């Protein structure tokens, strides 16, 4: 029986998920979706001091908001659970006993000071830092004596000697690592907690994960994990190490240089569709540059199109996809998206018409506030640029305009009548009308917003300028 493709996202709940880790989730989700496989969510919460339940809940909400639904794992269950590492200690201990029986692990009593001195000596000699193997050959009685003294100890995995660990990386091709250059490494710390190398690899194998996309910073972890799985006779996933996201200076993207948490993106008003389209192209090439939903993004996703070079974060590109998603949003979604920002001014019965009228003039919900006020406010705010236009326009223009206004609120016929009465045309016609009616020198199309301003409000605004009254 063929094992279905299964990818996974395995975050640590020590903070809110940002661009880097959510892109990792997206690539894994796109692959499983394309192959009609399984996308798994596992919570790697072995860092008890920093892990928070609130972050576990938040990351699930973020994935759901983006539409990255998982078919197995946290909150859903499955045959390979539990799906939180904090609940899997017994599983890890069981496989430690197997490694012990095979003499692939041993206790290490070296102190942190000893290890640091050793690293400095190796670095000074131009040797890649690795464990010296001091405790690798302790006899059983020596080990028991040290334990009897109460000396803290870690457990180290015994790497095979004079071997090459080779694998085909999905993104970077053939990879070769010498076991002698890696050295023996810790898989359980002195406090009893497990190291990433061990539990991450073990969980992937036991949960039958077949494909793993992760950041290229994990590339050197892979030979260690392959060695562990080989020692336990467990299956090895296909690993693909994707490029890191960098800022404008080529440095790893950080919160300081613009990395945003998914929750921040949501609060700012970004559409999930915009975020997905931007991230899907950050380190992955699509021939189709149109806005695509997740089905289309996954159908066109290809491992061959994943780049090796660092992916450069560009906020303007994210905003471009936001504008594309905004234009594609249907009326109910658009109204729901900006309702909270403009509820102070816009009547509920007119929210759809208002949203449609200003769609081309906004990027985020808060951008709609200026137009909500310009259309509905009783006391109209006027921009500095608009004030100069009002001062330059004769009061007679507004007197004539007020008389031309009719209840049908057809801006085309209204402006034509004003043109005939005043002789004004072009900017001399349309700019004073816009300024008097909205307080702004630019904005949504007047034929669309004049009906929202309404006859009484429009007539009042025009009449104010007959006497050159200050309406600020």
Image (cartoon, rainbow, N blue to C red):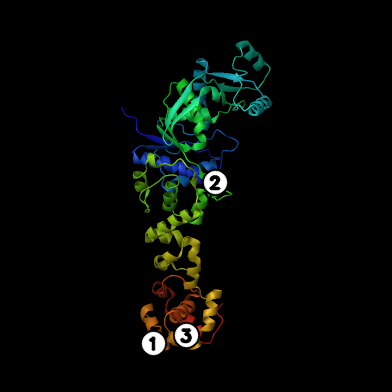
Point out the tag, 3 or 1, that comes first from the N-terminus: 3
384 relative to 338 in the view: left or right:
right
**Position of residue 265 measured from the top left corner of the image (x, y, whole percent):** 50, 52
**Position of residue 107 measured from the top left corner of the image (x, y, whole percent):** 60, 19
Q: Residue furthest front?
A: 126
Tell me if label 1 and label 2 are in contact, CB under 8 Å. Answer: no
Residue at mark 3: 398
- Asked whether residue 17 is in view, the answer is no
Distance from disc 1 to disc 2, alpha carbons, whole Å, reads 60 Å
- Asked whether residue 465 is in view, the answer is yes
410 lies above or below 167: below
Point out the tag, 3 or 2, that comes first from the N-terminus: 2
Residue at mark 2: 250
Question: Looking at the image, is mark 1 or mark 2 nearer the viewer?
Answer: 2
Point out the tag, 1 or 2, that comes first from the N-terminus: 2
Distance from disc 3 to disc 2, alpha carbons, whole Å, reads 56 Å
Residue at mark 1: 420
Taking depth in this image into account, of 257 and 25 the one nearest to the observer is 257
How dense is the environment of label 1, judged by Cα within 10 Å: few (below 14), some, or many (20 and up)?
Answer: few
Q: Please identify the quadrant where the N terminus is shown.
A: top left
């Amino acid at each position: 029986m063929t094992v279905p493709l299964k990818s996974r996202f395995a975050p640590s709940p020590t903070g809110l998920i940002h661009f880097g880790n959510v892109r990792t989730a997206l690539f894994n989700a796109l692959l499983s979706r394309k192959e009609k496989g399984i996308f798994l969510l596992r919570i790697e919460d072995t860092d008890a001091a920093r892990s928070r339940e609130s972050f576990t809940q938040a990351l699930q909400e973020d994935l759901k908001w983006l539409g990255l639904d998982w078919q197995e794992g946290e909150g859903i269950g499955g045959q390979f659970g539990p799906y939180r590492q904090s609940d899997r200690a017994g599983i890890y201990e069981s496989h430690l006993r197997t490694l012990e029986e095979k003499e692939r692990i041993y206790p290490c009593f070296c102190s942190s000071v000893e290890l640091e001195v050793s690293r400095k000596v190796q670095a000074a000699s131009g040797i890649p830092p690795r464990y010296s193997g001091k405790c690798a050959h302790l006899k059983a009685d020596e080990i028991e004596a040290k334990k009897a003294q109460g000396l803290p100890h870690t457990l180290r995995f015994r790497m095979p000697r004079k071997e090459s660990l080779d694998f085909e990386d999905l993104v970077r091709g053939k990879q070769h690592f010498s076991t002698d250059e890696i050295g023996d490494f810790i898989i359980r710390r002195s406090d009893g907690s497990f190291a990433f190398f061990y539990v991450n690899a073990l969980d992937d194998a036991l949960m039958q994960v077949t494909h793993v996309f992760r950041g290229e910073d994990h590339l050197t972890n892979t030979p260690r994990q392959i060695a562990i799985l080989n020692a336990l006779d467990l299956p090895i996933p296909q690993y693909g190490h994707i490029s890191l996201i960098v800022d404008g200076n080529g440095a790893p993207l950080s919160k300081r240089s613009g990395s945003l948490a998914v929750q921040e993106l949501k609060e700012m008003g970004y559409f999930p569709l915009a975020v997905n389209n931007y991230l899907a192209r950050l380190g992955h090439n699509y021939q189709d540059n149109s806005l695509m939903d997740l089905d289309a993004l996954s159908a066109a996703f290809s491992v061959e199109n994943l780049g090796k070079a660092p992916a450069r974060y560009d906020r303007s590109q994210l905003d471009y996809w936001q504008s594309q998603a905004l234009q594609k949003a249907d009326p109910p979604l658009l109204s729901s998206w900006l309702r909270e920002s403009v509820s102070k001014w816009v009547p509920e019965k007119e929210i759809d018409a208002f949203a449609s009228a200003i769609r081309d003039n906004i990027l985020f919900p808060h951008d709609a506030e200026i137009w909500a006020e310009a259309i509905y406010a009783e006391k109209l705010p006027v921009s500095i640029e608009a004030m100069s236009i009002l001062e330059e326009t004769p009061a007679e223009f507004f007197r004539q305009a007020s008389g031309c206004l009719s209840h049908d609120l057809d801006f085309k016929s209204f402006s034509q009548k004003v043109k005939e009465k005043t002789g004004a045309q072009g900017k001399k016609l349309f700019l004073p009308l816009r300024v008097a009616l909205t307080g702004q020198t630019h904005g949504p199309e007047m034929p669309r917003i004049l009906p929202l301003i309404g006859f009484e409000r429009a007539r009042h605004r025009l009449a104010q300028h007959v006497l050159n009254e200050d309406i600020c």
